[in-house]
């Protein structure tokens, strides 16, 4: 065995195995086995805590993040006022200001154990300030965080003058993925035409596709049908993602059933954004108010890869957030009502392995030969991680610890004595993995 850089001992793994040691050499995982007889430059005792591959952010906007209140707040809470606000802010953006906000967000993400982000970047700007800023940031953050950029015509591919040219310029500059926003075009016909043209562009350039698609409560917004059909027609299966897909919530059940089968056939990835979808959708309803999240349960049951995005943190569309993918997964679990014992772990997967599939990440996972990227959580298993959203004790990138957090600990002072509260029932009758030992 080569000289070891790191050993993590006594780990629980997401697949339910426990008491394992992980060894790292040359930035790769080289062993996963019990009681490893070896020494390393650094050892971490996981004490029976969950060691997981890093969280993956499948859908984000690094160019607008942390701009809350500039130039004013979104009073209606709608998607459309958010787009209006962003267009008011855009002329004042500089490469440095976008980079500074986006870099700060990347630091938050790393501290929360996220080591891959797919970010849409608005190309409806003649100066392409956001594109320039995020390309530079992608380079600077590469040792610590994978950033994938999507050329996103926020104001419409046909609706914004010059958008077709600007999408191509952004791709020429090095943006990775082709984006779109068909539901924001002027007509259904132009929406469908934008999907066809952008998919053809991706196929010509050998690129992947990720479109904001049907982010509306209109049950007749069916652009994802065209997206899936184009994926099949152009041989792009497994390389296309549909983000949001909220209209599927409001669709007729018969049609939705046919559509889910089509998405599975086209190997589309579906990317709901639970925090944002629950906040932005249903705003035009009185009561009952629709949830406005796509059909996660049905999509997963049909074998569609579903991964969640945070979408926004403190920007014109969403005022809250700390970029915690476990908060996203928890909201997804609640809104999709995925509360059965065999459903909850899938919500953890939606912010880890499923996200890696959506982004096409290579070397992701905890098997021997994978990149030595992982996170030690102060929780015993996936369900406990969803419930507690615990500290990320260690965040490891290519075998190096790049972030650490203190263990959470609460004490009560009652009846003249100190009582510790761990929020983990000592007498739980329901199945949980081995306990993650509390350190004194
Ligand atoms: Fe988005």
Image (cartoon, helix red, strand yellow):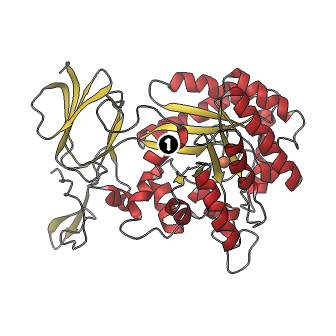
Q: Is 174 situated above or below 281?
A: above
| Left or right of residue 52: residue 130 | right
**Does the rendering let one see residue 271?**
no
| Camera-nearest residue between 25 and 202 | 202
The spot of residue 356 in percent (x, y) is: 48, 41
The spot of residue 362 in percent (x, y) is: 45, 32
Residue at horizontal 55 percent and vertical 62 percent from the top: 296
| Camera-nearest residue between 141 and 172 | 172
Residue at horizontal 54 percent and vertical 35 percent from the top: 104
Q: In which image quadrant can residue 33 be found?
A: top left
**Does the rendering let one see residue 287?**
yes
Q: How many marks?
A: 1
Q: Residue furthest bottom?
A: 287
Tag 1's secondary structure?
helix
- The residue tagged 1 is 357
Residue at horizontal 55 percent and vertical 44 percent from the top: 58
| Left or right of residue 271: residue 36 | left
Q: Is 363 situated above or below 254?
A: above
The spot of residue 249 in percent (x, y) is: 65, 67
């Amino acid at each position: 065995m080569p000289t070891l850089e790191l050993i993590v001992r006594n780990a629980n793994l997401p697949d339910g195995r426990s008491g394992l040691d992980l060894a790292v050499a040359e930035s790769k995982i080289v062993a996963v086995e019990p009681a490893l007889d070896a020494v390393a430059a650094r050892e971490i005792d996981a004490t029976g805590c969950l060691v997981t591959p890093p969280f993956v952010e499948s859908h984000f906007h690094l160019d607008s993040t942390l701009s809350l209140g500039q130039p004013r707040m979104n009073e209606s809470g709608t998607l459309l006022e958010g787009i209006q606000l962003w267009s008011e802010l855009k002329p004042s953006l500089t490469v440095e200001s976008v980079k500074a906000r986006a870099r700060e967000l990347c630091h938050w993400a790393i501290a929360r154990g996220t080591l891959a982000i797919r970010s849409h970047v608005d190309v409806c700007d003649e100066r392409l300030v956001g594109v320039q800023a995020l390309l530079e940031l992608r380079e600077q953050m590469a040792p610590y965080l994978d950033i994938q950029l999507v050329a996103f015509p926020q104001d419409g591919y046909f609706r914004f003058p010059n958008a077709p040219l600007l999408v191509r310029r952004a791709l020429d500059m090095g943006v990775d993925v082709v984006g779109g926003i068909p539901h924001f075009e002027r007509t259904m016909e132009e929406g469908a035409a934008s999907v066809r043209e952008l998919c053809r562009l991706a196929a010509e350039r050998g690129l992947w596709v990720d479109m904001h698609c049907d982010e509306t409560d209109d049950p007749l917004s069916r652009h994802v049908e065209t997206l899936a059909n184009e994926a099949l027609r152009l041989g792009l299966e497994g390389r296309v993602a549909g983000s949001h897909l909220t209209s599927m919530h409001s669709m007729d059940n018969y049609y939705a059933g046919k559509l889910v089968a089509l998405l599975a056939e086209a190997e589309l990835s579906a990317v709901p954004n639970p925090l944002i979808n629950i906040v932005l959708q249903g705003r035009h309803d009185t009561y009952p108010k629709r949830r406005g999240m796509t059909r996660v349960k049905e999509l997963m049951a049909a074998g569609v890869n579903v991964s969640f995005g945070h979408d926004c943190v403190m920007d014109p569309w969403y005022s809250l957030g700390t970029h915690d993918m476990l908060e996203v997964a928890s909201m997804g679990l609640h809104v999709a009502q995925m509360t059965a014992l065999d459903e909850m772990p899938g919500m953890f997967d939606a912010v880890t392995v499923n996200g890696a599939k959506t982004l096409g990440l290579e070397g992701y996972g905890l098997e021997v030969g994978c990149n030595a990227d992982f996170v030690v959580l102060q929780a015993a298993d996936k369900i406990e991680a969803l419930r507690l959203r615990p500290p990320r004790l260690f965040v490891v990138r290519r075998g190096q610890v790049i972030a650490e957090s203190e263990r959470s600990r609460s004490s009560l002072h009652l009846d003249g004595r100190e009582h510790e509260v761990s929020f983990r029932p000592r007498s739980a009758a329901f199945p949980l993995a081995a306990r993650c030992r509390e350190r004194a």
